[in-house]
Image (cartoon, rainbow, N blue to C red):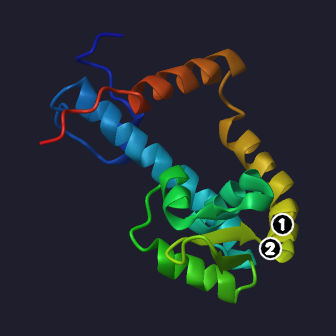
Amino acid sequence: MSQDTHTSSIATAIRQGRPFGGVEHEVFLAIQRAAADLTQESAALLRPHGLSGAQYNILRILRGAGTDGLACGEIADRLVTRDPDMTRLLDRMERQGLVTRQRASHDRRVVTTKISTEGKHLLSQLDEPMAALHRRQFAHIDPARLRELATLLDEVVARPQPPAS
């Protein structure tokens, strides 16, 4: 099918009548739309458990950190989607009993956050439903093509960053 007569799924979804400004623009919008749709489904799964996507991500990060826990900045660096107010988010999670926080004795400025027993329990309840959701979300794509998509997205994420000004 020629480029001129092909209408992409993203063009149809957003009712784009005119050609995109370039394939890069089309891909950018397609990634944004796919991320929004996929995120919306996972948010619906998390909502009954009182969790946002960022809170779920933090619990997974802290579970992976083990018994040492992590400082707030380290958690922020590992988040999939940046949250501008990590302290408030961690405060809320602490009130929910999902994490514990403790000031380091060697440096009172450092606060270490750890996943609580309740947080581990909630996360273990969500592991299989979230895995099943992801399997459903991508079931229509051949596994080899899914691997290819993962590789392409790795290239997007690893793109060279412009020099700091």
Q: Residue furthest bottom?
A: 95
Indicate whether 127 appears above or below 148: below
Q: Kindly identify the residue that appears in the image at 35 percent across and 27 percent down.
A: 159
Indicate whether 7 appears above or below 84: above
Left or right: residue 150 compared with residue 22? right
Q: Kindly identify the residue that appears in the image at 65 percent across and 70 percent down.
A: 113
Coordinates of residue 5 in the picture (x, y in percent):
27, 19
Q: Which residue lies under the disc numbered 2?
A: 116
Q: Amino acid at mark 1?
A: Lys
The answer for how far apart the CA atoms under marks 2 and 1 are is 6 Å
Placement of the C terminus among the 4 image quadrants: top left
Q: Residues within 10 Å of mark 2 (few under 14, many from 20)?
A: many
* Depth check, front residue: 110 or 50: 110
Q: Amino acid at mark 2?
A: Ser
Q: Which residue lies under the disc numbered 1?
A: 120
Give the label, 2 or 1, closer to the camera. 2
Indicate whether 136 appears above or below 82: above
